[in-house]
Image (tube, rainbow, N blue to C red):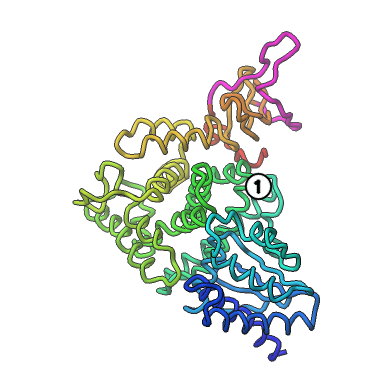
């Protein structure tokens, strides 16, 4: 068994060496030829024992075959895993019948030997490679494989659990582990791509007792959604998400009594609070395999567009695009969330406050964000023209003012035993709209969690 594990590890290391060589030299260079020979020998030997060999990339870890052999990447494999992530590759499957030419084509594709290549899969198809497949890793019990509020809730709960582990690890004096952080971001990215509405609805949760961890996840979700709307590359979208997740990590050094103080902070207390941006950047700079964006965002996310925030006396610095995106997500979620010193604000009020804060946010990005979350985001409680109250379940892309609503309270304010779903964009036989949203409703006024109505 140990022998097989060593052979699988040798396969991956030889593949990484061949790809690294082919990215530096011509494919027929002696260095590359030797590396290719080693990789080919390992691959064909393993394929004689079974119908296929699968190499999976999960975050910074490599998994080989169904035995889920975990290989720590280290310095030698770090560039290889980053290359797979950049090309959005999670799984490479070598099947019986693969030839030396097939394996050489795989190395060429992974090394980016062909300019203008759309994807590794496309390149392999152009070379008629039939026994090598590129795909996604099917993680066991991964709830992001499904859609709907129940599936989104599983992802959300799993994400907050991982966020808590990362926070506690840093709180104990250890550097955050990028591997579970990347797994968390991968889960959220998949869920955003499958069912953005349901996952973004969960960011409206207003639980004070888990604010730290839910805020980490919420800002990551809202940042990933923004990055996707900007059509950023998948690898960059994940880096945006990871930077967003870790943006407040410096607060592990901020005393709890200051973080949760119910009254206004004194000048001395606020000075202590402001240190978290420098502390966070320092922690993330020292964390191996942490994207360069992360410490930059941790340092910049309170600077504001006009540099009137903190750290003070930063005048000529041009803020990173990721910082501009994370800042919007950070403030939006913070104002909506329940804190020790105030109740969370309704989404409509938060949008209005942010729109009025000129000089704080990038105006174009803020407009795009408001369009993204919608006038009445999923999870919002709204009053209808019939005086009934319900929760928004889906937005209508063609008209953000006319969402789908699940009515839960009668016109007399009574909780309905049987809710009903209405599409406010549908007309009746006379061509009129029988239902229309009048305004948002603060859930605390009705003492109800809107998500329980979904």
For residue 48, above or below residue 284: below
For residue 188, above or below residue 165: above
Q: Nearer the viewer, residue 191 or 337?
A: 191
Write down the region rendered in magenta: 414-439
Q: Is residue 53 left or right of residue 386?
A: right
Q: Nearer the viewer, residue 79 or 281?
A: 79
Residue 250: x %, y % from top left: 36, 62
Magenta stretch holds residue 426:
yes
Residue at (49%, 73%) from the top-left corner? 25
Q: Which element carries disc 1, helix, strand or loop?
A: helix
Residue 307: image quadrant is: top left
Q: Is residue 15 visible?
A: yes
Q: Nearer the viewer, residue 34 or 286?
A: 34
Q: Is residue 209 visible?
A: no
Residue at (43%, 63%) from the top-left corner? 291
Q: Residues within 10 Å of mark 1 (few under 14, many from 20)?
A: some
Which quadrant is home to the C terminus?
A: top right
Residue 344: x %, y % from top left: 46, 40
Residue 191: x %, y % from top left: 63, 51
* Number of marks drawn: 1
Q: Nearer the viewer, residue 217 or 414?
A: 217
């Amino acid at each position: 068994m140990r022998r097989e594990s060593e052979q699988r590890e040798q396969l991956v290391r030889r593949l990484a060496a061949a790809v690294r060589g082919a990215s530096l030299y011509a494919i027929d260079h002696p260095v590359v030829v030797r590396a290719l020979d080693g990789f080919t020998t390992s691959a064909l030997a393993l394929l004689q024992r079974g119908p296929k060999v699968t190499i999976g990339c999960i975050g910074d870890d490599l998994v080989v075959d169904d035995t889920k052999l975990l290989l720590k990447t280290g310095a030698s494999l770090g560039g290889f895993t980053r290359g797979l992530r950049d090309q959005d590759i999670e799984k490479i499957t070598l099947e019986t019948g693969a030839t030396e030419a097939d394996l050489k084509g795989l190395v060429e594709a992974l090394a980016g030997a062909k300019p203008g290549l759309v994807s590794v899969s496309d390149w392999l198809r152009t070379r008629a490679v039939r026994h090598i497949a590129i795909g996604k890793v099917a993680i066991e019990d991964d709830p992001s494989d499904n859609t709907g509020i129940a599936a989104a809730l599983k992802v959300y709960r799993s994400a907050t659990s991982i966020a808590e582990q990362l926070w506690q690890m840093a709180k104990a004096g250890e550097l955050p582990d990028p591997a579970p952080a990347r797994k968390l971001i991968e889960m959220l990215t998949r869920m955003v791509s499958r069912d953005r509405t349901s996952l973004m609805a969960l960011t409206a949760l207003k639980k004070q007792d888990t604010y730290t961890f839910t805020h980490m996840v919420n800002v990551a979700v809202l940042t990933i959604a923004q990055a996707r709307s900007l059509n950023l590359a998948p690898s960059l979208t994940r880096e945006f998400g990871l930077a967003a997740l870790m943006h407040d990590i410096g607060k592990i050094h901020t005393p709890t009594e200051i973080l949760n103080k119910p009254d206004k902070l004194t000048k001395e207390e606020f000075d202590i609070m402001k240190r978290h941006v420098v502390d966070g950047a320092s922690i993330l700079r020292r964390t191996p395999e942490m994207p360069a964006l992360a410490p930059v965002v941790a340092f910049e996310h309170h600077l504001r567009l006009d540099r009137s925030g903190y750290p003070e006396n930063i005048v000529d610095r041009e803020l990173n695009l990721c910082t501009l995106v994370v800042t919007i997500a950070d403030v939006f979620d913070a104002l909506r969330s329940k804190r020790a010193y105030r109740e969370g604000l309704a989404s409509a009020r938060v949008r209005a406050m942010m729109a009025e804060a000129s000089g704080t946010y990038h105006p174009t990005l803020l407009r795009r964000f408001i369009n993204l979350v919608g006038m009445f985001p999923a999870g919002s409680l709204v009053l209808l023209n019939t005086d009934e109250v319900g929760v928004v379940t889906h937005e209508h892309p063609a008209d953000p003012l006319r969402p789908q609503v699940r009515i839960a309270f009668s016109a007399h304010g009574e909780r309905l035993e049987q809710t009903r779903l209405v599409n406010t964009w549908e007309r009746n036989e006379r061509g009129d709209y029988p239902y229309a949203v009048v305004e948002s409703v603060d859930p605390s006024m009705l003492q109800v969690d809107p998500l329980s109505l979904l």
